[in-house]
Amino acid sequence: MSSLERQPHGRRLTKKERAASAREKIKTEKAREGKPSRKRTIIAVASGFGVPVLIGIVALSQHHDPGLTTPTSTPGIVRTETPEVTKQDEQMLIQRAVEKRGVKLSQREQELWQGFGPLPPIDGENAAPEFIRFRETLKRMSQSKNPYFQESAALLTSLINNHDANVIFGRNLIFRGESVATAVNPTYLPNKIHWNIAISSQLFQGHPLNLPLSLTHDAKLINNQRAFINGLGTLLPMQKKLALAKQRFDTPDTLLLREMSGYAAQAEAHIYALGLMGDRALTRSGHDTITLGFIRSGEKSDSLDWQSFLLMRYPKMRKGWSLN
């Protein structure tokens, strides 16, 4: 018998008293249910700003900590693992990212890339049309108002002119068992690194920004490795620096961070391109998906949300497989 059915001095309650006690208990519980908690009020207010935003926040939180308790759903909200995002939502997210960077539409930028027609004919026996288009792409990247294109073109042009890099083209480019758009593979010489940049010929057949965006990714990987070597100081012998750089390049955790940084630079370049060119910068390819993933992940190259997004898209990335 529960304590509600017994008086403090041990006298048993009458049938009438027990019924009154039961009614009082029900009345108290109903009063408690009718009083909204602070947590429920916050969720209701958040839902007023738009369902996609609220659902996205909840999904990300659950991914970071599987032990979190799912908040009580409010009427009209359906919680899913991967919330649907409409085209209108995508345009809003892109526009916010563009405005955040203060990028304005540029007719000159539009004409710079719209002028890219079919591949030029072969000029001479040894000059492949892909290499001509590659050189022209670097030239236009350097002329672009996009700072990521400018910096990438300057680095790659310098490496090629100084014979510190070579470019390889292939019809069906396979890197570590995967079909890829581009791949960067360093060769460690006694006193320097020689960079081998492989490019799939398919990049020259689609959207004119496909190649610049992929090259921005590759340039970021190269620049990060060079920065690591330069950060080792002047006292350490170059051979020792290169040994440490090779070890770092092949470490699984570093491989993942390297790709996160590369794809972030690629996404940043794409955001600037979207600001400068508008819808003309939408590639209708994986570049669009990566850029939206970067924006929705908080636009931080080292965040867990960004890492989770990339690993879901490219599960083999931990092994260093770059799929631009």
Image: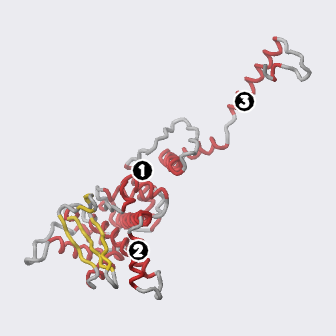
Task: Note whether 303 is above or below 131 in the view shown.
Answer: above
Task: Name the colour scheme.
Answer: secondary structure
Task: Note whether 108 is above or below 238 in the view shown.
Answer: above
Q: Looking at the rendered structure, which numbered label has been put on residue 224?
A: 2
Label 3 environment density (alpha carbons within 10 Å; few <14, some 14–19, many ≥20): few
Q: Is residue 77 left or right of residue 280?
A: right
Residue bearing mark 1: 89
Q: Position of residue 27 (x, y in %)?
A: 74, 24
> Please, what secondary structure does the residue beneath circle 2 have?
helix
What's the residue at 72%, 29% (across, down)? 31
Residue bearing mark 3: 31
N-terminal label among 1 and 2: 1
Which residue is situated farthest in the right direction here? 9
Q: Is residue 49 visible?
A: no
Which residue is situated farthest in the top direction here? 15
Label 2 environment density (alpha carbons within 10 Å; few <14, some 14–19, many ≥20): some
Mark 1 and mark 2: Cα distance apart in space: 34 Å
Q: Position of residue 246 (x, y in %)?
A: 38, 74
Q: Position of residue 281 (x, y in %)?
A: 31, 62
What's the residue at 57%, 47% (across, down)? 46
